[in-house]
Amino acid sequence: MNEYKMLKHWEKNILPKMLDYCRGGLKQYEIDNFFEQLRIELRKEACEEAAHIAMIICDWKMPGGAQLPSANHDWSSFSIDEIKIGEWAICKIKDDNGNLLSQYFRQK
């Protein structure tokens, strides 16, 4: 399993937008300091603390296009980008009632 999945998600989808947003208002050493504090919390998978730091950096509003992941996101699961041809994965798919479908997607 990949380490630091939460950090990688933020590095790809959120931090660049935050950096563009706050670059004009903060000095470089402040940006470096705040973003490293944010990365420390992301490495610990402390989503709420990371979101709090992000809101402080951005004056309590996220920049356009930067969507924080939900607090109950399962970081142990694979995203479609992480699956490669030739690898195996087990999927647990539930129907509308919450019952697990069989491995061949047939209802029992």
Image (cartoon, rainbow, N blue to C red):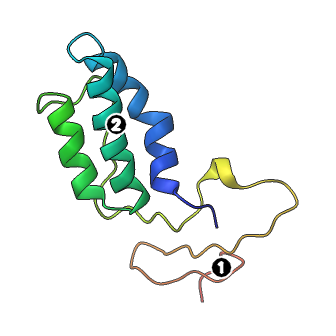
The structure residue drawn at horizontal position 39% and vertical position 79%, both measured from the top left corner, is 97
Q: Nearer the viewer, residue 96 or 77?
A: 77
Name the outermost residue toward the right.
86
**Residue 17 screen position, x and y as percent:** 37, 24
* Mark 2: secondary structure: helix
User: Going by the image, does 79 lie left or right of 57?
Assistant: right
Q: Nearer the viewer, residue 71 or 56?
A: 56
Identify which residue is drawn at 43% across, 66% down.
74
Lower position in the chain sequence, tag 2 or tag 1? 2
Quadrant location, the C terminus = bottom right
Q: Where in the figure is residue 104, as x and y percent of width and height?
A: 72, 77
Residue at 46% over, 49% down: 7
The disc at residue 20 is: none
Q: Nearer the viewer, mark 2 or mark 1?
A: 2
Please tell me which residue is depicted at 35% across the width and 30% down the height of the picture.
Answer: 32
Residue 73, quarter of picture: bottom left
Amino acid beneath label 1: Arg
Residue that mark 2 sits on: 35
Horizontal relation, residue 62 to residue 83: left or right: left
Q: Label 1 belongs to which residue?
A: 106
Q: CA distance from mark 2 to mark 1?
A: 47 Å
Which of the pair 89/32 is nearer the observer? 32
